[in-house]
Amino acid sequence: MKCNVLLYALTAIASASAAGNDATAESFASSSAAPNQHEAKDASSCSDDQACSDDISSGPYYCVDTSINSEYEILTNQDCFHDTPAHKSIGDFVIPIVPPGQKKNIITPILWRDTSSTVDNNNHGGKIVSQYAFQITLPPNLVPALLNYTSELGIIDKFRQFTTSSPIPHATTAEDDDNNHTGQFHTFGKHRWYAQRPAQKWDSNMHWISPADETTHEEYLRVLFEEGGFGDILGEIGEALELDGLVAYHLTFLAVSSSNSGGGYTHHDTTATGGRVYNVIIPLLLEDDVDPELILVDDVSG
């Protein structure tokens, strides 16, 4: 039977000086390696404020540093890039493809994809979605390392139970359930973990499993850095965001297969950090042939 549980790894990182502060929905949406790249044509004839269609072998051409993004400050000086070709692209966000010979940025702003039929009827194509939301390119070993780790420990099997036959019960009273998550301690391998689910008002079978002590936290970090190569990209991310240092203060695995909340609830873990605290969302298992699972709220239009 095909498993349709969506599994993610989530790492909350912060500037070392901001980790203890009262931490806008700041996040990284990670992407896998780009598809085969095609030679990019000169797009100098494109309007500064529009996404421009190139030949059929490439997707539309986007530039971050345009007047539509004049109010944004972070990472607006990057080179222009092509989107994924239309026949391979899904969703509302541009997926950068860099031509051969041009250095690929590890981190890029998330841009709205142009969904109009002509550049004269552009519906905000090329606009930055949020000042503090970015795409990052993952090291090639990271996802395989995390999948192997969760599979060997039995975490994936436990998520299948949580999202089907054996969910964690909701809180016993409506008042408690509206404000609190419910959870259980579990041992996987030699380490202690804590599994939780959100309040009933979220109307979802989402569960997440996090390290329950320092030893487990350090083991998770070991897999991220030593086996997955996560540290290989942190330096470039920190420099791009002008951070003095980084600390990972919360790690978790998260799974969900259904939600009945209509348009869903917008959620943020931290607010008013000035771009000093971020969630790094790493997709591990995704369902095929479904609508995109990541929803972001625009800074301007909401």
Image (cartoon, rainbow, N blue to C red):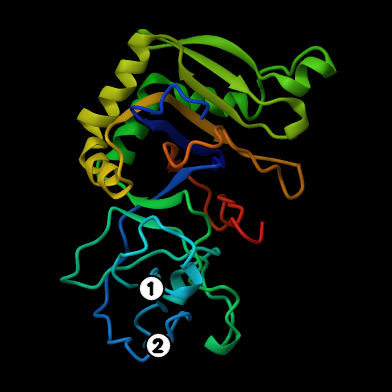
Q: Name the residue rendered at 71%, 45% in the picture.
A: 264
Residue 32 lies, in percent from the top left, at 35, 52
Q: Quadrant of residue 39?
A: bottom left
Residue 155 lies, in percent from the top left, at 46, 23
Q: Name the residue rendered at 51%, 70% in the picture.
A: 113
**Quarter in which the C terminus is drawn:** bottom right
Camera-side residue of 271 and 91: 271
Vertical comparison of 79 with 135: above or below: below
| 99 on left or right of 216 | left
Q: Name the residue rendered at 57%, 73% in the picture.
A: 124
Mark 1 = which residue? 63
Total marks placed: 2
Residue type highlighted by circle 2: Cys
Crowding at mark 2 (Cα within 10 Å: few <14, some 14-19, many 20+): some
Residue type highlighted by circle 1: Cys
Residue 156 lies, in percent from the top left, at 47, 28
Question: Do callouts 1 and 2 mark residues in contact (Cβ within 8 Å)?
Answer: yes
Crowding at mark 1 (Cα within 10 Å: few <14, some 14-19, many 20+): many
Q: Earlier in the sequence, mark 1 or mark 2?
A: 2
Mark 2 = which residue? 46
| 161 on left or right of 134 | right
**Disc sitting over residue 1 in the figure:** none
**Quarter in which the N terminus is drawn:** top right
Residue 189 lies, in percent from the top left, at 37, 11
| 82 on left or right of 274 | left
**Circle 2: element type:** loop
**Circle 1: element type:** loop
Vertical comparison of 24 with 10: above or below: below
List the single residue furthest toward the left: 101
Q: Name the residue rendered at 73%, 50% in the picture.
A: 263
| 189 on left or right of 8 | left
